[in-house]
Image (tube, rainbow, N blue to C red):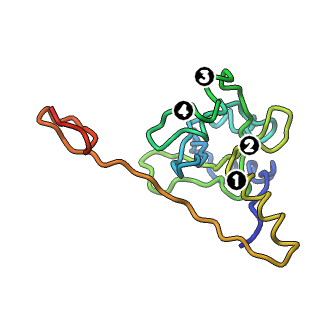
Amino acid sequence: MTAPTDRAELHELEAFLHGYPAIQEIEILVVDLSGIVRGKRISRTELRELYLTGIKCCASTILLNSEGNITAALGLGLDDGDPDKLLYPVADTLKPVAWSAVPLGQVMVSFLEIDGRPSAKHSRHVMRRVYQQVTPRCMSACFALCLEFSLYTLGEDGLPYPYCCAVP
């Protein structure tokens, strides 16, 4: 395993903008603790801000559970006012989306604290810290993701209901 990739540099953005002039929207994507890709779309003009200063996003985005809800036990979200963090682009991830019917780009992002420090709760930074601790000791790290899922069944009304519950 190699160390996680760092923040993307401006030359990557310039090459992308030059190479794909038809792309006007970009999806910025982050993987949360449940392994679910979350994000939002920004315009081509906002992409420069992402690369230069980062874009603000609420901290709970990467800490949602597999159902998309804030996990109250973490003390984040409602308890702390869900403070902003900074999203920044990950190097070598800004790409066109080949399967999109309209010109579209995607870039993976990572979380920083507002003061520029890596966010201690983002799995990308946790993985980097573990990697940096084990490699000097001639050890290797094996990372895996445990996926959780829910089973649903369709009710008579055509709506999905959790499989464990009575279906109306």
Whether pointer 2 and pointer 3 mark residues with C-beta atoms closer than 8 Å, the reply is: no
Instruction: Report which residue position mark 3 lands on.
Output: 78
Quarter that holds the N terminus: bottom right
- Kindly report the distance in space between the C-alpha atoms of the residues bearing marks 1 and 4: 19 Å
Q: Residues within 10 Å of mark 2 (few under 14, many from 20)?
A: many
* Placement of 62 over or under 70, stated as above or below: below
In primary-sequence order, the first of circles 3 and 4 is 4
Residue type, numbered disc 3: Leu
Residue type, numbered disc 4: Ile
Front-most of residues 33 and 40: 33
In this view, the residue farthest toward the left is 156
Residue type, numbered disc 2: Tyr
Whether pointer 4 and pointer 2 mark residues with C-beta atoms closer than 8 Å, the reply is: no
Q: Which mark is residue 19?
A: none
Residue type, numbered disc 1: Arg
In primary-sequence order, the first of circles 1 and 4 is 4
Q: Residues within 10 Å of mark 3 (few under 14, many from 20)?
A: few
In primary-sequence order, the first of circles 3 and 1 is 3
- Kindly report the distance in space between the C-alpha atoms of the residues bearing marks 4 and 2: 22 Å
Quarter that holds the C terminus: top left
Q: Position of residue 68 (x, y in %)?
A: 48, 37
In primary-sequence order, the first of circles 4 and 2 is 4
Question: Which one is closest to the eye, mark 2 or mark 3?
Answer: 3
Q: Quadrant of residue 93?
A: bottom right
Q: Residue at x 53, y 52 (%)?
A: 35
Instruction: Report which residue position mark 2 lands on.
Output: 88
Instruction: Report which residue position mark 1 lands on.
Output: 124
Does residue 167 appear to the left or right of 162 in the view shown? left
